[in-house]
Amino acid sequence: MAKKQKETKYRTVRGGILYGILTAVLVAVSVVLACTVFFRVEEVTVEGCERYSAEQVLAVAAVEKGANLILTPSDQIEHRISKNLPYVDTVQAQKRFPTTLKLVITESQPVAVMAAGEEQWIIDAKGKVLEKADEGLALQYIQVKGLELTSPQQGQPAQTGPEGEKRLGSLLGLLQALQDQELISEITEIDASLSTEISMVYQGRIKATMLTSADFNRRIQIFEAVVALAGEYDRGTVNLKTEKVFFTLDN
């Protein structure tokens, strides 16, 4: 009697396990079928891009319509866009179920021009090389003096020779601080020829000098306070190399 009860209990347990396994398999199959049948790419949208048309972005994104949305590789799409469109700073391929892929783009902002031999190249505040500039286009941005690019390539980080690496780092630090403080459009020239100090020209009339090791955000804040006290047409030099600030007016 006891033996029959054990056999009955064993069959019940084994049946329960088999039922559980079968249920799990059926659920997995249903999920796979649902993903395959229902979650397909039907629409790809582009947001935040003005320099390039949606057609240009989609062409390099190479998203296959009808492909499985879940299995669509977002990182590969983002890489293709960033690699082929130099003015794209960041891109996110966001999946919007059930059928939409949304490409959200932040564009690089051209801010300065650097020489490379006889050529002029536009860079953003992070030092990304954006494009070669003719004379007219180059005049729209900050003119960088005393530092040249080495073998510039569109879409790649700016590079200089070994002797200019520290000065390039200071230049980019200053550009980013100016961009953060929303002052970059007022700067007409930056001189990065010295290893210990860097200077900039505000509105073509006020020069500011600071150490290359300075906290640029703090120095720019101090400079803005000085400019606010200066006359609208004053010309001169602001010495920001020490904690005690000097503003010398031109005669």
Image (tube, rainbow, N blue to C red):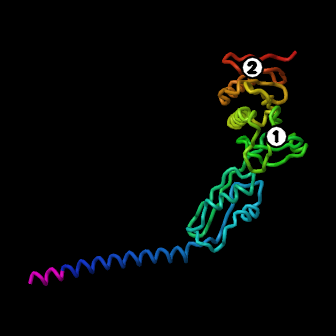
The stretch of residues the image draws in magenta is: 1-8
Asked whether the viewer can see residue 183, the reply is no
Q: Is residue 35 above or below residue 150?
A: below
**Label 1: which residue?**
113
Residue located 68% across and 57% down the image: 47
Tell me if 188 is positioned left or right of 62 in this view.
right
Q: Name the residue furthest front.
A: 162
Q: Between 19 and 251, which is closer to the camera in this rendering? A: 19
Say whether disc 1 or disc 2 marks the residue closer to the N-terminus: 1
Q: Which quadrant of the figure has residue 97?
A: bottom right
- The residue carrying mark 2 is 239
Q: Find residue 38 and report its horizontal and vertical position in percent.
A: 55, 75
Residue 5: x and y in percent read: 13, 81
Name the kind of residue labelled 2 in the image: Asn
Mark 1 neighbour class, 10 Å CA radius: few under 14, some 14 to 19, many 20 or more:
many
- Whether pointer 1 and pointer 2 mark residues with C-beta atoms closer than 8 Å, the reply is no
Q: Helix or strand or loop: what does disc 1 sit on?
A: strand
